[in-house]
Image (spheres, rainbow, N blue to C red):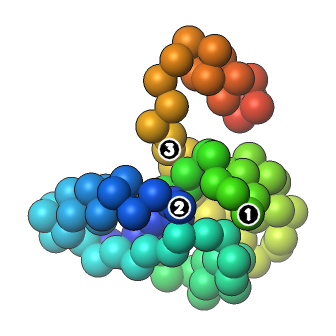
């Protein structure tokens, strides 16, 4: 399977990509959401791993854009974050609708 990892953190991108590679998958990486809608519209990704906190556009805003674009509306997305405080987690769950 082919995955897209969007994360502004080089370490996080590398760790997730390495893990997926070890499982036999192919991975493309991006450090921002710039041009991601166009990439995802090709329909070649089993899932997109999307960081929540990024400087250019947060993951929630990008996900809303993805869902309102007909070519990408049904793309599987896995939101990911290294945030770990109770406040950060509750905020993320609230923003994500969980």
Q: Position of residue 82 (x, y in %)?
A: 45, 37
Q: Is residue 77 above or below residue 22?
A: above
Q: CA distance from mark 1 to mark 3?
A: 16 Å
Determine the residue located farthest toward the right in the rendered image.
Answer: 68
Q: Can you say whether 72 is above or below 48 in the image?
A: below
Q: Nearer the viewer, mark 2 or mark 3?
A: 2
Which residue is found at the position 39% from the left and 63% from the top? Answer: 10
Q: Residue at x 58, y 22 (%)?
A: 89
Q: Which residue is mark 2?
A: 8
Circles 2, 1 touching at the beta carbon (< 8 Å): yes
In this image, 88 relative to 14: left or right?
Answer: right
Q: Which mark is residue 80?
A: 3
Give the CA distance from mark 2 to mark 1: 9 Å
Q: Residue at x 51, y 74 (%)?
A: 30
Q: Secondary structure at mark 2?
A: loop
| Lateral position of residue 40 relative to residue 15, left or right | right
Residue 31 visible: yes
Q: Secondary structure at mark 1?
A: loop
**Residue under the image location 82 percent in, 62 percent down:** 65
Q: Position of residue 2 (x, y in %)?
A: 37, 75
Q: Earlier in the sequence, mark 2 or mark 1?
A: 2
Image quadrant in which you'd find residue 91: top right
Q: Return the mark for residue 68.
A: none
Look at the picture and state if 35 lies above or below 3: below
Which circle's residue, 1 or 3, is located before the other in the chain? 1
Sort mark 1 into few (<14), some (14-19) or many (20+) by Cα contacts within 10 Å. Answer: few
The residue positioned farthest toward the top in the image shown: 86
Taking depth in this image into account, of 20 and 89 the one nearest to the observer is 89
Q: Front-most of 59 and 68?
A: 59
State the image coordinates of residue 94 (x, y, percent, origin top left).
74, 23
Q: Secondary structure at mark 3?
A: strand
Residue at the spot of label 1: 56
């Amino acid at each position: 399977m082919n995955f897209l990892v969007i994360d502004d953190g080089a370490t996080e991108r590398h760790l997730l990509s390495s893990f997926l590679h070890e499982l036999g998958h192919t991975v493309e990486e991006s450090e921002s959401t710039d041009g991601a809608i166009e990439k995802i519209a090709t329909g070649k990704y089993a899932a997109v791993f999307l960081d929540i906190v990024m400087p250019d556009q947060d993951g929630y805003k990008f996900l809303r854009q993805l869902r309102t674009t007909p070519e990408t509306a049904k793309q599987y997305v896995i939101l990911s974050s290294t945030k770990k405080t109770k406040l950060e987690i509750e905020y993320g769950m609230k923003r994500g609708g969980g």
